[in-house]
Amino acid sequence: MRIIMTIIVFSLGTFGYAQTEDLSNVMPFNEYLGYVKKFHPIVKQAELVIDESQAKLLKSRGAFDPKFEVDYNRKKFKNLEYYDKLNGTFKIPTWFGVELKAAFEENSGDYLNPESYVPDDGLYSAGLSVQLAQGLLINNRMASLKQAKLFREQAKADRDIYVNNILFEASLVYFKWLQAYNELVLFEDILVNAELRFRGIQKGVEVGENAEIDETEARIAVNNRKLGLEQSKVKLMKAALELSNFLWLENNIPVELQPNMIPDVNSEAIIDATFSINQLQTESMALETHPKMRSLDYKLQGLEVDKRLKANKLLPKINLEYNFLSETPETTNTFNTAEYKSVLNLSFPLFLRKERGDLKLAKLKLQDTEYERNATRVNLENKITALKQELESYVKQNEITTEMVSDYGMMLKAEERKFQLGESSLFLVNSRESKLIDGQLKAIAIQNKFFNTKAKLFNSLAVNPDI
């Protein structure tokens, strides 16, 4: 009996949730996040935001593409050619409200409008069109291109936020899996000890050293430990399946976590390195570079462009077009100011109600985003500060629980010795062991909360690590 109890005491001395592991079956935290970042569909979906912004930028640049136009009109009725008109134009838009233009015109017919008469070989023209007031310094195509560039930069910041969020969710699931595994190992260890104690009590009953009620109590303890082990197995299985949701390979192939795969129980250093926790805790908060703040900054700049465009709409529309005319464009001196075609268009709404309303709406949107930016900044500052303080608290809590578990282990060993000497009961031994188990479970739970808080700090700063 004393030999058996000595083995029990030795086993309890190594009571914990670390065991000899086959490293080939261990999935380190950083490798796991690396797979998530590289192959998870939501991460790839986040990259589509960049592709969308590039497509919008390409589309907005299309407003500055040179354009070639041809108009051909002909009318023939009862063997009479009323008119045959050909007009070809080549236009080059520029950044400001100026458009370069070259054209060729050839017209003929029995009933041609006199203003359309041109030389037999056609008439060439070259000139430009200028928006003198509204549209000169900013116009729709200029604003669209500026906003598309800003949207591209905003999309990059939003992409970092999306990727960080999926890595954060994947991290929480890994920590949940780790917690379930640690609890499983703990219950496996305590079941071994409970069964060993039960066999020792059985032999004690056979030789008359223990009462039968001790055997019953020992059996209850064994069944209780078995129940805890089965519950921990179910919890681990559910956590493993949840983890599988984040495991993908190339070509969008989902991967199911194999039953023999286990988490790395010594993950704290890897977690800190992956999240750059030491750097995040010690460095001052540079919120201006935070992806959320950068996204709002680019949004503000885009709204500022829209406000400038709306303010420009308050100006009158004054469009001036001037074209030099020539029959022989190959000769440069044939283009002169004496032969030209010009157009002047002027329009101006009397009340400007639509334009003033659009400008007011643009200002309100800008002001709303400024309020959002200020509120977001304060929320981020407070959240990051709270998480840093929470991390400091969990460091202390871990130290306290480690000391508590050590003390519970010492109390259990002392109670075991007293039981061997006949000065204690199996009930007290089981009670001491239950306290130790509760302490171990509490330590595992606090470790999980500690890791979760690190992930929350990582998420609050929206870090996009190179994994």
Image: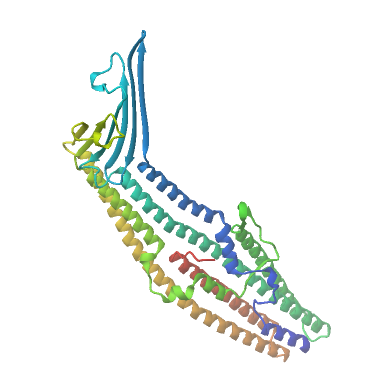
Residue located farthest toward the top when viewing the structure as drawn: 78
Q: Quadrant of residue 141?
A: top left
Viewer-nearest residue: 336 or 100: 336
- Identify the residue at image location x=45%, y=48%: 52
For residue 284, say whether it is visible.
yes
Q: Residue at x 28, y 52 (%)?
A: 304
Eyeballing the image, is 325 above or below 170? above
Q: Is residue 390 visible?
A: no
Residue 218, given in percent of the width and then of the height, sits at 73, 77
Which corner quadrant of the image does residue 158 belong to? bottom left
Observer-nearest residue: 341 or 397?
A: 341
Q: Position of residue 337 (x, y in %)?
A: 19, 35
Q: Position of residue 226 (x, y in %)?
A: 71, 70
183 sits left or right of 343 in the view: right
Write down the quadrant of residue 211 in the picture: bottom right
Q: Is residue 183 above or below residue 159?
A: below
Q: Position of residue 125 (x, y in %)?
A: 28, 32
